[in-house]
Each structure stands twice: as C-alpha cells, then as structure tokens.
Image: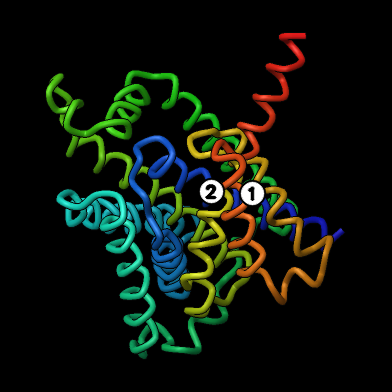
Amino acid sequence: MGYEITLLTVIATNILLAISLNLITGFCGQVSLGHAAFYGIGAYTYALLAVKSVSFPLALIAGGIMAGVLGTAVGLLSLRVRHDFLAITTMGVGFLFLGFVRKQEWLGAELGVSNIPASGLGDVAFMFLTVILAVLTIGLCVHIKRSWMGLTFNAVADDEDTARTVGINVMRYKLAAFGIGTFIAGIAGGLYACFTRIIVPDAFDFPTSIMILAMVVIGGIGSNWGVLLAAVILTLMPELFRFVNDFKLLIFGALLVVVMRFSPGGLSGIVRAAWQKVVLR
C-alpha cells in the first residue's frame, strides 16, 4: 500500500508540473527550459518555513507565491525576447537557481535541507490532497482555455504583433501566464518537499526541466488531457521498466525528437486523428 500511495503522489505532483508548464508554453507560446527552478523555489521556500514551525498550509501557499513572484519577474526580464532567445533565457534562470542554492550554506548548499516536518495529515490523506490539487488545477486550466483569457493567450501565442494591433496588452498576458504557471509549480515544489522531507539541488536540475517539457510536448502542446496522460505515462515508465531510470534523459530526449518529427500534435494529436478517421468512415 505504501508503494501505491507514493506512486500516486508522485504522479499527481508531476501532473501539476506538466499542467503548469503547459499554461506557459502551450497556452501562451512562451517556451521555458527552466521550469524546474520554480519547482525548486517552491520546495526550498516551503522547507525553510516548515523547519521554522510555520504551518503546512501557510508554508505551501508561501512557496507558491514566492515562485509566482519570481516567475513574474523572469517574465518581465523576458518580455523583449522570443522563441529561441526566450528558451535560452529561461534555461539560464534554471542554472542561476542551481548555482545559487549550491553555494548558500543557509540553504544547505550541496546537502540541501533535511528533516523537513511532515504535513501532519498522514500519507493517505496527503496523497488525496495532492490528487485533489491536481484535479482542481486541471479544472482551472480547462476553464482558462475556454474563457476569454484562453482566447487571448492563443492570440499572443499565434502572433504577438497582430495581437497588439487589435488592442491586446501582450505584456499583461505574458506576465499572467508566467505568474500563474510558476505559482502552480511552486505549489508542486512545496508538496514534493513535504512528502520527501528532504530536498537537494539535483532534484531541480536541467534534466528535470527537460522531463517536464517532455510531458508537455509528448502529450500535445496546449492540450490539457494530453499533457495529463503524458505525465502519467512518463512517470510510470521508469517504474514499469526499471532500465529506463539509467537512460531517462536519453529516452525522453529521443521521444521528444520522434514526436516532433512524426506527430507534432503529440498524443492528443494522434488520438484526434484516429477519432476523425473513425468518424469519417
């Protein structure tokens, strides 16, 4: 039972991460290669507050807010860059975060933070909480995609210049995407820190950002249910096939290349095409 609880908790946390990046990259077209940094900011914020006896809900929300504020700041810095340059900028943010935490003794440096207090809910209740938060986040993103905000995000993603000509405040919506997406990533980081009760810098490195990006691309950029499905599959893959753990980054990278070459729409695109063939028959 303990293994199943752990696995479900990890899956729900990865869903939060994938959905949060999909909001930034899939909805608004802002490519981010440093999403793990905001995951780490939420985790470290939660850990530092929790060891100071701050309550679980307050520490968790504080982690999300800290990640959201810093994510919005990164969004501000990135307003003048697009596409490849934006990807490089966010990648640099990820490396900057790792370099910072590894040199700070008050953050545990390379050893990280240990003995993080538990939530007090118990493993089963904590798992249900994580799943509920993942479901609520999916619901939020579905609502956003169908709302006027989602339509505006799509306009910004398609062509920023055209969006400006029709009166859309591109800066406001790009910052909103970064702020909301990184806030959710911060919440995921707090949940991770609380569940594992120990965090180290390597948990938030560049391969983690690639793993999150792989979930978005393989699921289908912009597709909520496709990204959810990819998060579940890519989390279960190392558990079902143990050899994957030794070559995780290589396999995820290969999957990214194959999907972008043969099915840019990801899993959602494959399912949609198959469904259309069935209907047309």
Residue 36: image quadrant is: bottom left
Earlier along the polypeptide chain: callout 1 or callout 2?
2
Residue found at x 57% / y 77% = 198
Image quarter (top left, top right, bottom left or bottom right) of the C terminus: top right
Q: How many marks?
A: 2
Residue type at mark 2: give it.
Answer: Ala
Residue nearest the viewer, comparing 26 with 17: 26
Q: Is 35 left or right of 269, judged from the image as shown?
A: left
Query: In the rendered image, which quarter is residue 245 located in?
Result: bottom right
Residue at 27% across, 54% down: 69
Which residue is the site of mark 2?
18
For mark 1, does the 10 Å Cα neighbourhood hold few (<14), some (14 to 19), or many (20 or more) residues?
many
User: Residue 178, position in %: x, y?
Assistant: 32, 47
Q: Position of residue 2 (x, y in %)?
A: 82, 62
Labels 1 and 2 touching (C-beta < 8 A): yes
Q: Does residue 222 sit above or below 75 in this rendering?
A: above
253 up-or-down from 127: above or below: below
Q: Amino acid at mark 1?
A: Ala
Q: Tell me the residue that label 1 is attached to.
A: 231
Residue at screen point 32% across, 25% down: 149
When the figure is inspected, residue 139 is found, relative to residue 276, above or below; the finding is: below
Residue 187 drawn at (x, y percent): 47, 53
- Which type of secondary structure does the marked residue at label 1 adopt? helix
